[in-house]
Amino acid sequence: MEKSFIFPSVFEEDYRDFEKVADSFLEAMRIVNFKDKSFIVGELALKEGHSPHKFLNSSAEDIDYQLLGLIGLIIATQGTYNKLILTVGFPFTTYQPYRSGAIEFFKRSHEIEFDTRTLGGTGTEKVSFTVQEVDVMSEIEGCVSSIRNGPLKEKDNFLIASLGYGTFELALSSPGGLIYRTTHSAPGLMYVVNRLKSDLEKKYYLSLLTEQQLERAFQRGSMIINRRDTDLRELRSKALRSYYNEVISPSIRKKISDEDFYRAQKIYLVGGGAMYNEIVEFFKEEFEGVLKVIVNPDPNLAASKGYCQHSVEMANSRIKPMDEKSSYTCVGLDLGNNNTVITVNNEFFL
């Protein structure tokens, strides 16, 4: 059975003693003795941290990538599985230089220690697991895989626009693979959040909020400033319109030809940005009569689901028939700049 888990991609170094703060690990993640430091992560970092953060488009050499990645794999074990078949991904622009480093980091045995007191426990607990096989895909290929091999079973040519926080990516997909001439990367939704921040700072002092904290307020459409509830929806709509006009539309004009539009009569929107109705409407306005605009189901999970499908393919081709299959699970890890998404499938041999 396939399951997906998600947590905010933020962390902060922290040495406080916590009592129980939540009933689930996803809301109470505190990692100890990681490179001789302790960290609160995800929802707990957003609630208890002073400056929860993540580096933008980090590699496997960076501590945030290592920390968030291993926490994602703890979640993937589900307290049961200790052998993982893993696929991870990177934006198209960093996929080639970061690929070998990710494989080297993940493909081995790992042990990570977490604080159980945040869940009502009495101390710390260690989790051990081994990544038996690992591969790396580009994010856009992961999303294409989820569209072609998931429930939609898309067989035709299509354009795909991946609207991530760090990166906007574009490509034309045929049943035989990507048309590489059409692939393109540009700034993601961080462009919009920074635009919103600049507009707000003309009127307000924002108390040195991090990009990740502002992004959460951006999603909600409101935030408390100077103890007053401030509606951000109008500013957000303007910032999204600016982003579409200045980044998305020019990218499509630059990379997609009239002949490409003839080949593909539909465009799939994936990534967290596809969850904003404004952006979807901007696509429909521009391409009415040219392209059918389709928002992929659960667009923020698309890359992780595609990675997991690839892990299933690896498992069925590489795991020996005599191995104890009950200890294995297949994992797709999308370590995003906004959220980390983990998709697992432990019924791949059935």
Image (tube, rainbow, N blue to C red):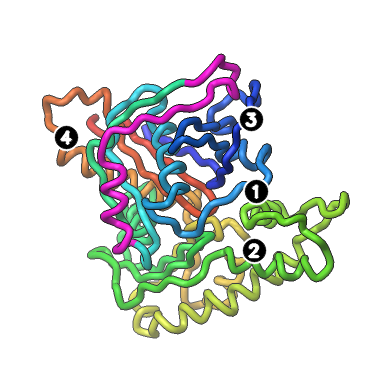
Tag 1 secondary structure: loop
What residue does disc 3 label?
A: 16
Image vertical order of residue 325 relative to residue 309, above or below: above
Q: Percent from the top left, x then y, of residue 350? A: 24, 29
Separation of marks 4 and 3 at Cα, in angstroms: 43 Å
Separation of marks 3 and 2 at Cα, in angstroms: 31 Å
Check residue 319 in the rendering and tell me which mark sits there, or answer none.
Answer: 4
What residue does disc 1 label?
A: 51
Is residue 232 or residue 99 the one in the foreground? 99
Q: Quadrant of residue 225?
A: bottom right
The first of marks 4 and 2 along the sequence is: 2
Tag 4 secondary structure: loop
* Residue at (64, 63) in percent of width and height: 193
What residue does disc 2 label?
A: 193
The first of marks 4 and 3 along the sequence is: 3
Image vertical order of residue 122 relative to residue 271, above or below: above
Region rendered in magenta = 95-124
- The type of residue carrying mark 1 is Ser
